[in-house]
Amino acid sequence: MPTEGELRRVRELRETIERHNFRYYVLDAPTLLDSEFDCLLRELETLEKKFPQLVTSRSPTQKVGAEASSAFSEVKHLTPMLSLTNAFNESEFLEFDRRSREKLNCASIEYVAETKLDGLAVSLVYEGGALARAATRGNGSTGEDVTLNVRTIESIPLHLNCKEPPKLLEVRGEIFITKSDFERLNSDQISRGEKTFINSRNSAAGSLRQLDPKITATRPLSICCYAIGHFVGSKRPTTHYEVLDYLKGIGMPVSGETELLRGINQCRSYYKRLLARREKLGYEIDGAVYKVNNLSSQEILGQVAKAPRWAIAYKFPPEEATTVVKAIDVQLGRTGQLTPVARLESVFVGGVTITNATLHNEEELKRKDIRVGDTVIVRRAGDVIPEIVRVILERRPKDSSPYVMPSSVPEQTLVQRMLSITHFASRHAMDIDGLGNKIIEQLCRSKLVLDPSDLYHLNLNSLISLERFAEKSANNLLISIEQSKHTTLARFLFALGIPEVGVTTATSIATTFGTIDNIAAANLEQLVDVPDVGPVVSTSIRAFFDEQKNREMIQRLLDCGVRWPKVEISTLIDPALLDRRIVLTGTFTSMSRDEARMALTERGAKVSSSVSQNTDIVIVGSNAGKKAEKAASLGLQVTDEMGLIDLLKMK
Ligand code: IVH
């Protein structure tokens, strides 16, 4: 018999899980991490296994997902949409393989390995080859009718690509948003003053479940198909691998990471390879899925309450975890900037134990409003530096107050100044000969130099007032300081000491944008597209130029006469056009379509021939056909020849 405490815990767990299921599936606003949720569900499963008399059909362990939201009409699935059993470590996976071999009475099993995508499951019903209905999984037997929304997803065919389509085909797959689309979506949300999404799963779910399909149409949803649900027709495939092949053949997007494997060693190797590539994939995955390949073997294995016994999701270690901020310290960074660092209760995440997380800079700290005592979500993906994703406000202590960066840290400030001057004067930066560490220290201590621009105000008198400074060496130094004013944009950019910006990156950015003003104005998306620049670097650059004191310092340097030859950029990049996806259709009077395409490409735009929800602008000439109609139906920005001339600034 369960004890009073165990009974209470079961009730507590059920309530928490149900409340969370609702937040997750219906409101698309989870407050628990997936890993935390998994832990709770596990605990409940263990208790129910110990006391089977407590299991009821209403227990969340017996149900998939949550009830369908009332906003959409209900769809009863032709075959229940099952979930997957999870394995959290190798022994759980081995146990799955052992049980399956035992039941199938064979020495080794052929599996199909796939990625476990982190999105939301949909069922797509094709009748006579035409998309008739699309539904979310809902509670597994009844879901929401999202046909209108699904029709707006470019990569989902409205008609199957086959001569003799089956009478009825139900395709199952995962709707998701790629990492880059997610970033773009969130920056668009910010620029429209709208709420940003917490993660890509959340944004995929939120986008699919819009009441207005026009909104869904503007969202960059992708799909990866991984199974057939119901099938009425001839020539049904006999293995899961054939299923995927068949789906691919009829035009459904399937994963490119799928492999046919035999036995556990190959499965182990797939898992390791996939884990190592996880960061490089363009979309979020949270594990590998193994499915018994032979469909008749699948039938023999059957299913338990809500999951098949022929498949398992072998989860990756979570990249996010929650922990508590014990203290916030200020650290002196490599290029002299002060960096706030959170000291954390140690926590195991992304495969290592972490105790610190960088808070980047004061602005970031303020924006995220991280306070001592806060419970936070930390993230460590791949080899990147652990960082705090956000504060869980619901768990903030009542008496907490915002963290205030120390305003005066005298010795630290001095060292910081010295480091930034040393960097500024270094060989690959402004290359100021004769400005050694001892001199820099004296200049900073005497407050003759507070930031790099003060170097250009030094004169003979101020220099010889310093200890052991002879007139000749002072003169030589003044000459090299003067000479350093003739520099290059790349050197100047490197000299600014922007965290993460090395010589190569600085060069790449300089040649892409051509002027310091263009760099200062570039948004994250434009920066990320520069060769050598990833999200970390671009965030750092953006943060640097967002600080007014940095912009003022740059102006002072320019006012002192620091200059460089005009940068030869291979194109006439126009930041307003850079990376905008443009489609040209119809004919124009002032130029041919090819000329228009070249002029736009030269300015940094990406001109493509087909209209999709990812298209930014459609330029419509005369006699435009289908593309113009499609642009209108997707609600895209459409302009005419005058608009084109405007964009090219040819007036
Ligand atoms: S098969 C009968 N394959 O994970 C099994 N599901 O945790 C049905 N998922 O509801 C699912 N990637 O939304 C399958 N390669 C994959 C998957 C996958 C992600 C999702 C799917 C499912 C959930 C179960």
Image: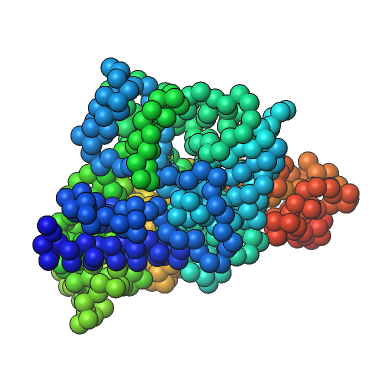
Q: Is residue 447 visible?
A: no
Left or right of 508 on screen, residue 35: left
The N terminus: image quadrant = bottom left
Residue 296, image x and y in percent?
A: 44, 25
Nearer the observer, 402 or 470 = 402
Q: Is residue 237 above or below residue 221?
A: above
Residue 211, image x and y in percent?
A: 60, 65
The quadrant holding residue 390 is bottom left
Question: What residue sits 23% from the left and 66% below the top?
Answer: 12
Question: What residue sits 40% from the left and 64% below the top?
Answer: 22
Q: Is residue 572 above or below residue 403?
A: above
The quadrant holding residue 30 is bottom left
Numbered circles on residues, count? 0
The quadrant holding residue 67 is bottom left
Residue 400, image x and y in percent?
A: 22, 79
Left or right of 265 on screen, residue 346: left
Nearer the observer, 504 or 621 = 621
Left or right of 245 on screen, residue 582: right
Splitting the image into four quadrants, where does ligand 1 fall? top left
The C terminus: image quadrant = bottom right
Question: What residue sits 25% from the left and 42% below the top?
Answer: 88
Nearer the observer, 268 or 144 = 144
